[in-house]
Amino acid sequence: MTKKTSRRSWLTKEEVQRLEEGSFYRSYEKLGAHPDKEGVWFAVWAPGAGAVSVLGEFNDWKPDAHPLRRRKGGVWETYAPGAMSGQRYKYRITRGMYTVDKTDPYAFAMEPPASGGDASSGLASIVCDLDYAWGDKAWLEQRCGPDSLNRPISIYEVHLGSWRKRGMYSMGYREIAKPLADHVEDLGFTHVEFMPVMEHPFYGSWGYQVAGYFAPTFRYGSPADFKYLVDYLHRRGIGVLLDWVPAHFATDPQALVFFDGSTLYEYDDPGMRYHPDWGTYVFDYNKPGVRNFLISNALFWIEKYHIDGLRFDAVASMLYRDYSRGKDWTPNMFGGRENLEAIDLLKKVNEMVYNHEPDILMIAEESTAWPGVSKPTYDGGLGFLFKWNMGWMHDTLEYMEKDPVHRKHHQDRLTFPLLYTYSEHYILPLSHDEVVHGKGSLWGKMPGDAWQKAANLRLLYGHQIGHPGKKLLFMGSEFGQTSEWDHDHAIDWDALKDPLHKGMMAWVKDLYTLYRDHPALWNDEPGGFEWIDFEDHEGSTVSYIRRSTDRELVFLFNFTPVPRTDYRIGMPGKGRWRELLNSDAQIYGGSGVGNLGSVDTDPVPFHGRNHSVVVTLPPLAVSILEQEK
C-alpha cells in the first residue's frame, strides 16, 4: 500500500459505532466505492457474511484478489490500489455454503443489465467520483422551503424515457435538458417532478422497483449527465423534484434481496417481507443499517444532486402493516396495525432533511386519512411539507366523468373536498396514476364527443387552478393526449396538429401563467377561498372567490353544455369586473360565448351580497373575473 493510503482503516471508530446504532446519516460518504489518486476504498454492510471480497476490472474479476476486512457492526472494508473511476465491480459474499455476487447497495453508478452468468456480467456497479462543476448557486440561494406554502408551486410530472424520443430511443439527460426547460417555462410550471431515476433493471416498473438507490439509471446517461440536467433546469429557474421509493425494493437477485445470505434489508417475518401489490420486498425499518441506508439516500440526492424535494411514493403502505395483505400480516408489539418503525423512519427522514437543508419540499403520496401528515414532528405530525390530495383527485374525476345531464345529482362530489382542504398542506395531483392500467387518458375520461371532451377537460383544469392547493399535472395532459400513457412510446406530440389539442395547451399555458402571477391563487389558508354559490344543483353551476390581501378573483363554472344567459351572481365588490380568462374562447377551441370582456355590477343584493352581476355562463366552461381598480 502506498504511503498516501497507509492508514489501516477507512471508517473511523466513531463512524462504525454510528453505523451500528443506525445514526450514520451520511453513510454514503464511506460505504460504497470511494476513489482517490492511488486506488479505491471499498466498504459494505454485510453483518451476516462469513467472508466478503471485491472483484472487478482492476483485478480481472478474481474473487481472492481483494478480500475485505470485517469491522464492528458488520462493516467490511478494503483498499484496492490501482483501481479507478469508471471500472466495474461487484462484491462476492460467502456465508457457509452460500456464495453470491452482489451489486454495491451504495454504488453511485451501475452498468446496463446483461445476460450470462459470469462475475463480470449483469448490472455491475461502477466506481464513480461524482465530481461536477455546478452553476446553480443563484437558484439554491433563493429556494424557499417551508415558505413555499405562500408561493406558487405548479409541478410538471415527467417520465424521462417517454417524454420525447429520437426514433425508437429515449432522449438522454443532457439532450432533454433544453427542450424540457423550454416547454416547462413556456407553460408556466414552477417545478419538474421526475418519476424515479434510481437504477431499476425492469424498465416497465417506471423506476418504482429500485435496485440501485444511489445511482441514476444508466438508460439516459451518466451521473454527471443527470447533474447537468438538474443544473440546467435550475439555471432556467425551474425546480427539480424526485420520486423516491422507501416503501419497497426490487427482488432482482443481484441487488438488495438476501444481500449477505440473510434477510438483511427486508423483514425477517415472511408475512411482512413480500408486498402483494407490486411483487417487491419491504424494508425492515427497525434495522439500524436500513435506517442508515434510507436516511442517507434521501440526503444524498439533495446534497449531491441539488434536488429541491422528494415525493415519497406509497406512504400509506408504510404506515399500515396490513396494507393490501388481507389476513396475512403481523401486528405491531401492541397488537395494532400501525407500522411503528416505519412511522419513526418517516419522521426521522423529514427531521434530518430539514435540519440540514431547510429549503427542501418533502411531499407524501398518502391516500388515507392519517392525521398530521404535513404537520411538523414536534407538533405530532409526520413532518412532511405537503401531501397529495388523493381525495380531491378521486372525487373531482368521478364528478367530471359523469354525463352532464346527471351531474346535478352528484354536485357534492365536486364540493365535498372543501370540507377538509385545510386539514393538510395539499397538492392537487392529476398524475400518471390516473392514466395507466386501463384507466385511459384524462381526455378519455371526459364524456361527450371530441369538442365536449376538450371543453370538459378545460373545465377540470380550471377547477384545479381555482381550488386551494398546489398543482401537479402529468406530461401529455397539457395538450389532452387521447390515449393511455405507454412508457414504451413518447407522448403524442402529433396531437398538437389538431386545433382542439393545440387550444388545450394554449389554455393550460394561460391558466398556469395566471396561477403563477396571481397571489390570490397561492393563498391556501382558510381566508383565501369563499363560496359564492354551490347550491345550484339543477343548473350544475358553482361560483367561488379566491383572494389575497389586495386582490380577488371570481371563478364561475357551468358544468353543462347549455349556455346560461341572464344569470345573476352576487359579487364581493361593486364596479367593473374584467374577464381574465374564459375557457370557451375560440383560441382554446371553444364556441366563443362570453361577456365581451367585462361585466358591471348592479346594486341588487344576491347570494347574501350587496351587489351582483348578470352574466352569460358559456357551455362547459369556466370564466375567471377580476375587479378593475
Image: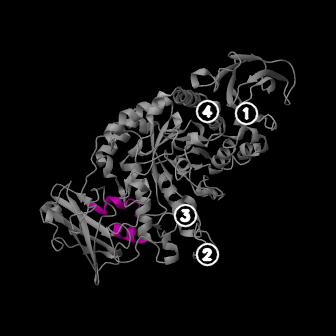
Percent position (x, y) of residue 546?
69, 32
Which residue is identified by label 4?
A: 458
**Mark before the other along the chain sequence, 2 or 1:** 2
- Which of 305/592 is in front? 592
Looking at the image, is mark 2 or mark 1 nearer the viewer?
1
- The percent coordinates of residue 82 (x first, y second) are 13, 60
Q: Is residue 26 magenta?
A: yes
State which mark lies toward you, 3 or 2. 2
Identify the residue at image location x=25%, y=54%: 128
Q: Percent position (x, y) of residue 97?
A: 28, 84
The magenta stretch is 14-33
Q: Is residue 559 magenta?
A: no
Secondary element at tag 4: helix
Q: Sequence-wise, which precedes: disc 4 or disc 3?
A: 3
Q: Are marks 1 and 3 in contact (CB under 8 Å)?
A: no
Does residue 265 appear left or right of residue 600 in this picture?
Answer: left
Q: Amino acid at mark 4?
A: Arg
Q: What residue do we see at 18% from left, 72% from top?
A: 63
